[in-house]
Amino acid sequence: MDQRTAGVPLSRLLPLLGLVSAGIVLGIIFRDKLSFDTLAENHAALVQYRDAHFAQVAVVFVALYAGIVTFSLPGATVATLTGGFLFGLFPGVIFNVVAATVGASLLFLAARWGLGDWLSARIDTSEGRIHQLKKGIDENQWSMLFFIRFVPIVPFFVANLIPALLGVPFHRFVVSTFLGIMPGALVYTSLGSGLGSILESGGRPDLGIIFEPYILFPLLALSVLALIPALMRKRKKEA
């Protein structure tokens, strides 16, 4: 039997199982903490501490945000708003994108180590629709990676796991994640940068802003642009 298609050793599953287990525990512990209400209650103290210890707050923020993404905890949107609130549009958007990319990369590596290589090999040696689907993705990896990042309806953790399970090279995943999440991060970081006056008035930000036509249509346009190379390649094959 091909070693690539043999069963997955338990030792390779431990990182992924550890993330899943820790994610469940942390999700239960912090289910009421990673919320906008928590940010609203503590925003004044956060600003005061940031002003006194900017570098320390920046490092802790990036680490916490990366942890939220790594363990797929609810609260990534609130974390992005917090980045804008604490650090402004710039460098807030850089902190947000770096943290999200680091967290996504750790989750990707755990999934790749645990199941990705094995599952990818099984699909490569199989036949039928799933094999053809993976073949199509392999031939158009850059296009598909950017597409799932630009489309706002694809859950972030799904966009992190699918490439790991389909054998996407790590460097492609990192580059497409960093650049692909930038547009959405800019929107929410900008929203967060103006959060101070909203919190002081007791209001709430419009988290559905990304689905407003003036935001959604440009994102969809980017998604279409990402698919153009794949469509052109397919057309050349059919010609």
Image: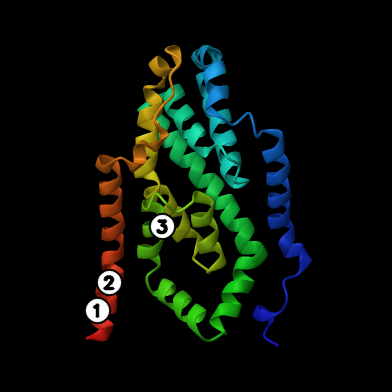
Q: Nearer the viewer, residue 100 or 27?
A: 27
**Are there few (<14), some (14-19), or many (20+) residues within 10 Å of tag 3?**
many
User: Residue 129 location, x and y as percent?
Assistant: 48, 81
Quarter of the picture holding the C terminus: bottom left
Task: Give the quarter of the image for residue 13.
Answer: bottom right
Q: Is residue 227 above or below residue 66?
A: below
Instruction: Please name the amino acid that badge 1 sits on.
Output: Arg
- Residue under label 3: 148
Q: Are marks 1 and 3 in contact (CB under 8 Å)?
A: no
Name the residue located 52 percent from the left edge and 38 percent from the top edge: 76
Instruction: Please name the amino acid that badge 3 sits on.
Output: Ile
**Are there few (<14), some (14-19), or many (20+) residues within 10 Å of tag 2?**
some
- Residue under label 1: 235
7 left or right of 229 in image = right
Q: Are marks 2 and 1 in contact (CB under 8 Å)?
A: yes
17 left or right of 160 in image = right
User: How many numbered marks appear?
Assistant: 3
Give the CA separation, mark 2 to mark 1. Answer: 6 Å
- Residue under label 2: 231
User: Residue 186 location, x and y as percent?
Assistant: 35, 37
Task: Give the quarter of the image for residue 110.
Answer: bottom right
Q: Is residue 181 visible?
A: yes
Task: Give the quarter of the image for residue 154.
Answer: bottom left
Give the CA separation, mark 1 to mark 3. Answer: 21 Å
